[in-house]
Structure formats: C-alpha cells, structure tokens
Image (spheres, helix red, strand yellow):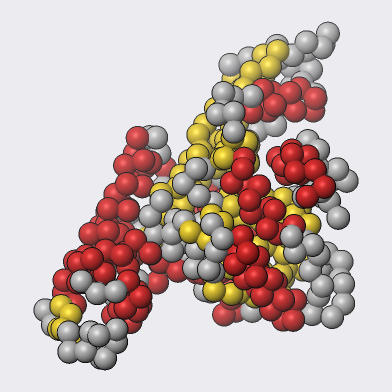
Amino acid sequence: MVDQPNIIVGLETGTSKICAVVGEVNAEGALNIIGVGQAKSRGVRKGEIVDPAAAEEDIRSAISNAEQMADVEIRSVFLGTTGAHIRGFNNRGVHPVVSADREITEDDVRDVIKNARAINLPVDHDVIHTARQYFHVDGQPGVANPVGMLGARLEVDVHVVHGHRNRFQNAIRVVKGLQLDVEGIVFNGRATAMAVLAADQREMGALVIDLGAGITEYVLYSNGILKHSGVLAVGGDHVSNDIAIGLKIPLARADRLKIEHGTVAPIEARTLTLANDNGLSGKEINLGHMHRIMTARLEETFQLIDEAISRAGLRDHLRAGVFLSGGGSRVPSLTTLAEEVFQMPVYLAGADALNGATNVLQTPEFNTAIGIVKYGANQQRPSAASGSLLGRLQKGFGKLIGRT
C-alpha cells in the first residue's frame, strides 16, 4: 500500500451503510474513481451519529476496504453531512462600493458575499455552504461576474445551507478518532446533485431527490445555479416501519419483504406465506396491502417535496425533469409514481462524467459518496482552515480535531 498524491476521498456516514469512495485526479485534471469501501452502519440514525463507538468501527472498516481496492493510504477525507437540522434558504447581501473610481474589485465581491452570509441564524448553527447565484450592480440584475464593472451598490443573491454546529462536530470527532484529517464538509444533497447532474441539466433546471434509509434530501438547480434545498426526516426505514405495523410483522421481516417483493406498481391481489421465521410460520401476507402501504408513504414524500418547490415558485423551472438517487430509488416503478406526482419526466440517476468502476458509477447508493469526491476535487486546499466552517469547528474542539 502506497501513499499517492492527488487522491481525494469522500466519506458518507449513512443510516444503512458507511461508504468511502477514493478518487484520483490525473495529470489532465480528470477525476477517476479508483476505489470504494463500505460497511453496514450500526451507529447512525436519520443520517446522524447516535453511537460513536459503533460508527467509528464501521468507518474504519469502510476506509480499510477502500484502501485495499485503491492501493492507497487514506489520511484525509471530505465528509458528507445530513440530518433534519439542516436548512437551506435564499438570501441577498448588499455592499457599497467606496473606491474613488467606483470600479468593483475582488475585495468588493468577497465583502458582499460575506454580508450575504451575515444572517440571523440560531446561535448554535453554522453555515455549511453559501452558493453564489447572481450579482446586481446598481439595480442591474443577472450579472455573473461584476469585477471590473462600475457601480456604487453591489448586491448578491446566494443560497445558504446551515445546520446545528454540535451535530457536525459529533461526526468530525468520530473521524478524527481514526487519525484521519477532515478536509471539509459538504451537505449530502448538494454532493448527490454534483454526482448525477450534467452541466446542461443544471442549466435547464433539475430536481435531485436522494432517498436514503433515514433521510430524504432534495436540491433544485436552475440556470446552472443552486436555487433550493431541503431535508425530510423520512426514508426507507419509515417504509419498512409502515409495512411492519400494517402487516403486524417484525421490522426486520418487513424490511426483507420490502426488498424482495416491494413495488409501487399496481399488482393483482395475492398472498405470500411466510416461512418459519420469528414464530411467523404459516402467516399469510397480502402483497396488495403491502403495495398500498409503500405507495402511500412514497407518494406522500414526493408530494411534500412538490409542495415545497411550488411554494418557492420553482416548479416551472424544471425543464430537465426529476432525478431519483439513493437506495430507496430502487423500488420498482418508483419513477412512474414520481411522474404522476410531479407531472414531468423522472429518471433513475447514475454518476455523470466520471471514469472508474462501472458498477459503482451506475449504482444509485454510491452517488452521494462520489459527489463528495467531486466536491473535494473542486475545492482549493488552503494552508489554514481558520476562516472556514471546518476551521471554526476545529478551533472549537482544539487539539481534539486539530489538523494532524
């Protein structure tokens, strides 16, 4: 095993699995996926750490598997984050141009973006992302790059994603306990969109929905920029729980039934006799009833997202359609159900514009971790992180999460 330059690792700590993906940036700047490792997740619920010891062990296993496949030594990761505490909204920053000649400089751009970030968040929250949208110069909208223009008043529209500081720190602390540096953190929903959307799809307008085990994330792009994001505290585990309650069977058995026989397509009424399992020998299951239970939960999930983007006035921006990702997107006929709700084309998403193991790139469960790698590849690695969210978190933990 050798240490290699230009290696970027994305780590997703999900509810059902821990996933580490290794990418390598070649001499031409292209990103190749060269390794992947995963482990069953035992210490994460609804996308957040609830058992640090179990999570640490599972992360160690996933990292080790990724190292073996890629033949590299992993020393740092970009860490994905999610949870019901994460919020996204649009904001506008304002900055007066005070130079004598009124020419807008890079410093003015930095200042107006800083002002856009200076919002009244809860005291225990931090900003994860400030995604730049458009600038306004003296009221002129739609300016992509104002540097060099003349103006007295510079404004910028941004999409801000923020969340609870301590809940980020919990995940960072676990990773640091493995003697791994955390290069940066990224909202999983944004990472998924980076993995699956091509530039023309972001330009046309697209909604990406990632259906995880404990959490559903969604982000919307239009005109090439991030316009909207959100998190629902529902996922595949909730579908399994609904089945368990509706059919009066143990949760583990309900989860297996969902995987083996689950669908949201209309089916003829038929029964399934359970084998000897947890005292359920001979119990008959109505698969039509299970279909109705699954359809109700997933349809409600899509309806909640549809209502959110409609309230934001963005529904008509989706000329490229809707893209489903995550393990929950594998439910048979789910794209058809989503099309009925959104009334537009819906696609099962795979990783876009990358080289590497085809089976990984075409597997929706790996999209988020691949997107975290892409995010990392797009970031400049500063010598000090004191001005970033990660730097503030590191400062708060002192030596515990300081750079190694």
Which quadrant would residue 387 be assigned to in this image?
top right
- Residue placed furthest toward the top: 100
Taking depth in this image into account, of 166 and 145 the one nearest to the observer is 166
Taking depth in this image into account, of 151 and 376 the one nearest to the observer is 376
Taking depth in this image into account, of 101 and 328 the one nearest to the observer is 328
Is 146 left or right of 209, judged from the image as shown?
Answer: right
The reply to whether residue 37 is visible in this rendering is yes
Query: Which residue occupies 32% across, 68% down?
Result: 240
Query: Compared with residue 177, is residue 221 higher up or lower down, i.e. above or below?
Result: above
Give the number of callouts. Answer: 0
The reply to whether residue 373 is visible in this rendering is no
Estimate the x, y position of residue 297 in percent, counting from the top left.
Answer: 27, 59
Query: Compared with residue 25, is residue 302 higher up or lower down, i.e. above or below?
Result: above
Query: Which residue occupies 43% across, 59% down?
Result: 214
Query: Which residue occupies 64% across, 28% down?
Result: 117
The N terminus sits in image quarter: bottom right
Estimate the x, y position of residue 310 in percent, counting from the top left.
Answer: 34, 39
The C terminus sits in image quarter: bottom right
Estimate the x, y position of residue 247 in percent, counting from the top left.
Answer: 19, 72
Is 104 left or right of 221, judged from the image as shown?
Answer: right
Which quadrant would residue 248 be assigned to in this image?
bottom left
Which quadrant would residue 257 be assigned to in this image?
bottom left
Estimate the x, y position of residue 178 in percent, counting from the top left.
Answer: 75, 64
Query: Which residue occupies 23% across, 84% down?
Result: 280
